[in-house]
Image (cartoon, coloured by chain):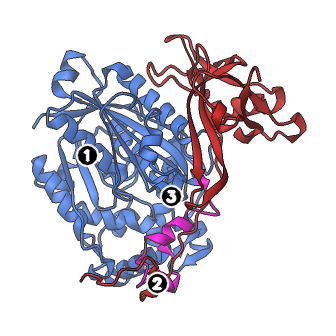
Chain colours: A red, B blue
């Protein structure tokens, strides 16, 4: 059977309501624990080093995805990174226009495999690939050991 | 089709909650399996992942999420899922990768992190029901099993204490398992009979726990095994899988016809005509104690209604004539859905290659059968 009337309001039809409720508590894992504790207590980011492949992983991992070595050595991520890609979000997840666009970036660091996706703390007109940035952290007392301890990335030279 | 052997196995601890992420658990099991086979990730052609619906870990597209921990980076990689049957079915998927000639060496990695789901994974299981016919009644999954158990007891006149013996046997067998979550050397039939009633006749100690855990195996072709001079291998001589009507109300609950059909397929492929005589031990799926009995009958290793009698007579003990769940099973080792491959396929490998340690069956064994439900089973020797 095909509906001949066109409507986008499903509630106008005979319907059953349901809700798949699901709540979660996640563990940050072995490598994640190191990363978040260092971020909270020391205000720095750690990468895990694969001595066999000569790679430093950010975010740190327990293992090298290539050679499958267990990684136990952690190194500091350089404080200065670069914007590898940007986007300006104009709509929220429901499709409603945002009062002003949000700027998001992929930030990478020299010699580091991977990177972080986070807010870029510049006006949209100034968001560009290649911008030198550093993490802006919350004050130590406000940090809880979460990715949101980083408020975003801001230009090294304003 | 080409001959396929299992050449390595590994598994993590099974616990109610592990610190490791799903990826990290997969890595630990995979690394162990590769080490036991004497291989590295570079030797692997393809990777199969088995894991339950995303709602348990709370990560959508969790097959892709787990990929790096499974050794799947830059390899052909597939996730399979067939309910609890994934505990065995993912190894069937691995088998066809090798048997078909597409791959020489394949990793199969199964994972579950059920502790993420709050307050209990049961809250996710509640949504497997039909949203219009069943869910308005707010059913609980245990009800299905309680009714199936009741039907099985009713048809054959099975006593509750004979079912409880399975829980006692498996939790005691698990004492020898380094990964076990619920091993108990002192448990008695009375302990099971006196435990909390969840949904009669299912009591607390009739049921396996939710767990975090991962397991992995390595499969390889006969050529590969010969070329690499690999000594420890267990051949997968037959596999079968089958599903019944998806309306569980349309089955006669006392006998798992789907298991029997899967078993017949596997036995035929393995040229086994008298399974009770030709099979030395079994790892049937035991998420509930009565399920081991139900599945033994489905596997045609006991006549209908005979499995409780064999259990009472000690036939299914580790030193009996037909050891059943020498690993400790799901009842003793734990039940991280797909990762129960460790007690099923892993245990067959360890027993058949004489690496089961304290769990080793004291007499010589050559042929075993493993089965998981979601209605599936493979057979090995």
Please report the bounds of the magenta region as a residue range.
Answer: B115-141
Residue in the image at 35% along x and 66% along y: B293
Q: Label 1: few (<14), some or many (≥20) within 10 Å?
A: many
Q: What secondary structure is marked by label 1?
A: helix
Asked whether disc 2 touches disc 3, contact meaning CB atoms under 8 Å apart, the reply is no
Residues marked 1 and 2, same chain = no
| Quarter of the C terminus of chain B within the rendering | top left
Q: Quick check: B375 left or right of B202?
A: left
Q: Residue B300 at x, y = what percent?
A: 21, 62
Q: Label 2: few (<14), some or many (≥20) within 10 Å?
A: few
Residues marked 2 and 3, same chain = no
Dot 1 or dot 3, earlier in sequence = 3
Q: Quick check: B23 left or right of A34?
A: left
Q: CA distance from mark 1 to mark 3?
A: 24 Å
- Does residue B108 appear in the picture of this structure? yes
Q: Residue B31 at x, y = what percent?
A: 45, 27
Q: Is residue A43 magenta?
A: no
Q: Residue furthest front?
A: A125
The residue under label 2 is: A16
Q: Residue A108 at x, y = what percent?
A: 59, 23
| Total marks placed | 3
Q: What secondary structure is marked by label 3?
A: helix
Between marks 2 and 3 in the image, the one whose residue lies nearer the viewer: 2
* Quarter of the image where one finds residue A122: top right
The residue under label 3 is: B55
Residue B92 badge: 1
* Quarter of the image where one finds residue B129: bottom left
Q: CA distance from mark 1 to mark 2?
A: 39 Å
Residue B196 badge: none
Q: Residue A77 at x, y = what percent?
A: 68, 19
Q: Is B252 situated above or below A82?
A: below
Q: Is residue B127 magenta?
A: yes
């Amino acid at each position: 059977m095909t509906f001949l009337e066109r409507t986008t309001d499903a509630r106008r039809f005979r319907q059953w309501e349901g809700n798949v409720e699901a709540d979660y508590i996640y563990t940050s894992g072995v490598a994640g624990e190191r990363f978040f504790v260092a971020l909270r207590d020391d205000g720095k980011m750690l990468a895990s080093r694969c001595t066999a492949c000569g790679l430093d992983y950010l975010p740190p991992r327990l293992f090298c995805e290539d050679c499958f070595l267990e990684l136990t050595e952690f190194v500091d991520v350089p404080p200065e990174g670069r914007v590898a890609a940007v986007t300006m979000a104009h709509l929220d997840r429901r499709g409603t226009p945002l009062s002003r666009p949000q700027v998001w970036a992929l930030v990478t660091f020299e010699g580091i495999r991977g990177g972080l996706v986070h807010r870029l703390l510049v006006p949209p007109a100034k968001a560009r690939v290649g911008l030198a940035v550093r993490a802006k952290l919350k004050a130590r007392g406000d940090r809880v050991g979460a990715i949101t301890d980083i408020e975003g990335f801001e230009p090294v030279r304003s | 089709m080409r001959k396929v052997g299992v050449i390595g196995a590994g598994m993590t601890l099974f616990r109610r909650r592990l610190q490791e992420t799903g990826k990290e658990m997969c890595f630990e099991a995979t690394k162990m399996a590769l080490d036991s086979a004497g291989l590295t990730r570079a030797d692997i052609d393809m990777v199969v992942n088995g894991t339950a619906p995303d709602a348990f870990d709370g990560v959508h597209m969790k097959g892709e999420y787990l990929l790096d921990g499974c050794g799947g980076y830059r390899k052909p990689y597939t996730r399979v899922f067939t309910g609890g049957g994934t505990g065995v079915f993912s190894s069937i998927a691995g088998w066809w990768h090798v048997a078909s000639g597409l791959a020489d060496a394949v990793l199969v990695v199964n994972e579950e992190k059920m502790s993420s789901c709050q307050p209990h994974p049961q809250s996710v299981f509640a949504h497997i029901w039909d949203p219009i016919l069943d869910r308005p009644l707010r059913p609980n999954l245990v009800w299905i099993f309680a009714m199936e158990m009741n039907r099985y007891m009713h048809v054959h006149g099975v006593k509750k204490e004979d079912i409880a013996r399975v829980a006692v046997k498996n939790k005691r067998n698990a004492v020898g398992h380094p990964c076990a979550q619920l091993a108990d050397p002192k448990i008695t039939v009375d302990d099971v009979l006196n435990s909390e009633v969840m949904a009669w006749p299912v009591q607390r100690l009739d049921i396996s726990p939710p767990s975090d855990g991962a397991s992995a195996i390595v499969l390889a072709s006969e050529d590969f095994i010969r070329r690499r001079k690999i000594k420890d291998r267990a051949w997968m001589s037959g596999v079968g899988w089958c599903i019944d009507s998806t309306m569980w109300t349309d089955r006669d609950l006392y006998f798992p016809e789907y298991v029997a059909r899967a078993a017949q397929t596997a036995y035929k492929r393995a040229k086994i005509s008298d399974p009770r005589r030709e099979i030395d031990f079994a790892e049937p799926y035991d998420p509930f104690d009565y399920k081991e009995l139900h599945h033994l009958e489905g596997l045609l290793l006991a006549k209908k209604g005979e499995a409780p009698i064999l259990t009472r007579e000690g036939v299914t003990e580790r030193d009996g004539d037909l050891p059943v769940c020498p690993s400790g099973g799901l009842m003793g080792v734990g039940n991280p859905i797909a990762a129960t491959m460790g007690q099923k396929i892993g245990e067959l490998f360890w027993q058949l290659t004489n690496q089961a340690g304290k769990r080793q069956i004291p007499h010589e064994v050559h042929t075993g059968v493993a089965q998981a439900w979601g209605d599936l089973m493979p057979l090995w020797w």
